[in-house]
Amino acid sequence: MRLAASNQRHRVLVAVVPVAGLALGLAACSSSSSVKPVSAKAKQTIVFAESGLGTEGQQTQTAINGFEKANPNITVKVDVLSPDSTTYLSQLEHSFIAGATTPDVFETDVTYPAKFAQAGWVLKLTQFNPNMSQFFPHEVAAGTYLGAPYAVPWFDNPEGLYYRTDLIKTAPSSPAQVVADAQAALKKDHSLKEGLAFEGMKYEGAITAFLTVDSAFGGKLDPSNVNTSGNKAALAWLHDTIYKYHIAPTAVTGWSEGNVESEFVSGHAAFSINYPFVESLATSPPVKGHVGYIPFPAGPGGTPGSALGGEMLAINSKTAHAAAAWKLIEYLTSPAVETARAEVTGDPPSLPSAYTPALQAKAPYFQNVKTLNNFSAPRPVSPNYLQVSNDLQVMLSEIFANTKSPAAALAAAAPTIKNDASATP
Amino acid sequence: MAAQAADRYVGRPRDGRPAADRAAADRRLGYALVAPVIILLLAVTALPLISNVWNSLHFDDLSLAGLPHKFVGASNYSTMFTSPLWIAALERTLAFTVITVIFDMVVALALALMLNRKFRGRGVLRAAILVPWAVPTVVSATLWKTMFDPRAGFVDYFLGAVHPAWSSLTWLNASVWRSWVVIFTADSWKNIPFVAIILLAGLQVIPNEIYEAARVDGATAWQMFRRLTLPMLKPALMVALIFRTLQALLVFDVIYIMTGGGPGNSTETLSFLNFYTFINNTNFGLGGAISVMLVVLALIVSWGYVRVFRPSST
Amino acid sequence: MTAGNQAIGRASGRRLASQTLFYLGVAVVIVVALFPFYWVLRTSLESNAQVAAGVGGSNGVLPSHLSGSAFVNVFTQQNFLHPLINSVIVALGATLVTIVVATFAGYALARLRLRGAGAILGFILLAGFFPVLAMIGPLFLLFKNLGILDNVYPLIIVYLVYTLPIATWLLRNFFQQVPIELEEAAQVDGATRLTALRRVVVPVAIPAVFTAGILCFILAWNDFAFAVSFLYTFPHFTAPLAIVTFGQSQFQVFYNLIDAAVVIVSIPIAALVLFAQRRIVTGLTAGSFR
């Protein structure tokens, strides 16, 4: 411990020496060393990077203990990285850029595999003949780049519509019904502060809120052309909930999923758009026992809506332990292990077969989640997703703040998004 | 005794070396003592500047790893100069700077005049205005974010007395001008005290006699302020102006924390854009070009002030 | 009552009015400067439920009841102690390096008739105006290549751009005012420049060094731009960066918790201002003006 600390100080001193400035111009070029693959049967240690904290982290460790028991020759060292997804991405990116051979295997958000695959940082999984058809197809699509699989679904978080079953007796069957129900609930129950709460802050979550309603209006988030009548209708509806129907407050422009959760759980909102985790937090009145969770109901010409969130597992392309890493992935994504994880953490499994009757009996919300997973739409699968995401965030922020009309904002953003999505170096 | 000592020092010190040697030794010692400051400051300013110039002439995007760091001439600069984002950020930054500087200087001058009077409670006033200056920008930004929050804040609670309870007003990210109002409030609240303290120091060196003489001549308070205070305050005004202008020109923290550049891009400034290009887009070529322009802009402004103020202040 | 008396009465009435107006102005300034702190303190003492319910009704300028839960949670749930310790380390580190280096340089620039002293002082001043955001890209690359990204110690060096210019100027101006006879007397007794510096000048300079130290600590403690650019895991965050990330967490973090952290970070600064306001004022003006 002490040694490590003094070592750090020593490196700091190096930074002071101005000669080190020469390093400014030099790119890190230490990545070309080729490594000899180690067989799955050999005795070895692999590094697994993940972002789980608390119960999630503990459950991962439990699963890994099980894996090590089944494969005594493989030891798994867990690296816990940042719980913030953007930070997590840059941490991974920095080690990949440096050409590091570890982590051998790692967790990744559904929006990153394409980027990693294009950069050549992750291993193409075709060599292992993975059975991808056992997983929910939308999440498989998120891990597919140029037709080949690069990441395996680990758990699947579909975003959907929450409603208060005590205030709204039957689930709404169209967007118009959501508005009418919300207005009626606001009139009836004065402890409500808003009819609908959703994530409108300028961040990634605003995109998933939009995606959740998008397909209900016949919209589709295709970066090559976002300026479609379906997308326009979906954005207009979200805009109108604030400025025309007055069921959502302007305060949504500052809300992330945490704020939305708190609004719903403390009984301020009749409807909210959010992820499955909210269901387990609704433990006190007036919401306790009155939580409905459905795909966003379809309007004319649309299909029920849900946005795909979730985590996948992938292998570092520089690793020498690909075979052992693949064994770990197979183990962690096996139905029994996923069911066990779901029971403890509430993380929804990525394969339909893991939704056992026992699991659904224990926590009925898994039934809802399974339904939602059939509808969940992935965000654009693109190596340039970060840029596309930024363009979308700007557009949504303009619409929610009413500084541009949905049609104008969409028209203005469409060429930029197309350009950023297709930009190749 | 003292005279003798001084004599000896100037003439021939005890160690017997001539004064010229001693001066040379002093100078060598002096450069050795100054060197660390120069080296450290060069390392954190000049090196990054050189590196930025170099990078700005190259393609350098970390997220497109494996691509060569190839020479691209002025293409990063032409990307920047034709980028609507950069042009809009430049205009915004300049407008913000002009408004902030004028407002802050006027308020700070009033504060300084207040502090320059002898009255009971002056220490309390001075301590009260120093605290906002001394706390981190993160604190001032978070503080005003709380104040303007529609749920947790004071502002809407206070306005609630004027408008009906249901029409709560969202300030940040819900409207461009309201977002700017909040940013502006937090920024001025934190920075006015510093300007006021500098101006106060300027006021304190003005001799009282000249006011008395003017009063005898029947000058009004306004005339004395215009004809005596302002001209004598010129050096202090220049220092305050340079500091405040450069601060405003480089504004970043408060915007990152309060709006993240939103709604849309409408509160993005040059520094914000620079941060975003480097850290989020890992584009060190374009980021380098933006940085170089930022330095050039800062230099132009400082040079301009020095030009304008120099003739009469020396 | 004579006309003269009336005039005096009116004049003193006007004096009273202007006096009242003046104190009213003072009161307004104090309220504007300090009320936001009160509001943050108030919010930090609310429970989660109170924050979720919002301000209004019985829960107004005075909260309906007080709760210390946010202050407990900020340490137990959010591990705020880590960032706090990091901030203390880097701020003190930068302060120590600065005062050692700046004391010598300030002395040399004031006393040792260096050729080009004006240019050197000009450069130091200019460095103080250098756009901070223009430094982060190259420094990011440098730290990446040295493997010291996400490490708080390099910030000690980077923070010198905030602290060195003002400290060097302040101390140089101070040394110019120290009577030269003091040193000469010591040198007459056979001491070299350096020993005279150590034995005579440094003790005299201690108050000025202390002032410079306070200013440096405040400036280093307040950084956000470098921290947000170079640090990315929570255990390595500085306190200001940690406060901002509380607000960006994907799970609900209420304002009471964020504001509790704000209160904690502001306390050392407020204490410094209260104990050393005179020093700070003279330091600011000596370092930047003259």
Image (cartoon, rainbow, N blue to C red):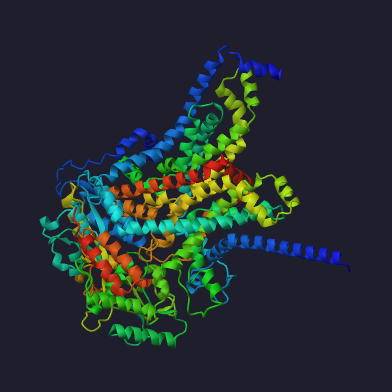
Q: Position of residue A296 (x, y in %)?
A: 28, 78
Q: Position of residue A171 (x, y in %)?
A: 31, 85
Q: Position of residue B265 (x, y in %)?
A: 36, 63
Q: Residue furthest front?
A: B217
Which residue shows up at 29% across the image and 48% down it? B284
Q: Which image quarter: residue A55?
A: bottom left
Quadrant assignment for the N terminus of chain B: top right
Front position in the image: B34 or A92: B34
Front position in the image: A236 or A156: A236
Q: Which image quarter: residue A414?
A: bottom left
Q: Residue furthest top?
A: B16
Which residue shows up at 42% across the image and 79% down it? A194
Whether residue A157 is visible: no
Residue B42, compared with residue A425, is above or below; it is above
Decide if residue B136 is on the left or right side of residue C245. Answer: right
Residue A31, compared with residue A387, is above or below; it is above
Decide if residue A81 is on the left or right side of residue B189. Answer: left
Q: Position of residue A28 (x, y in %)?
A: 25, 41
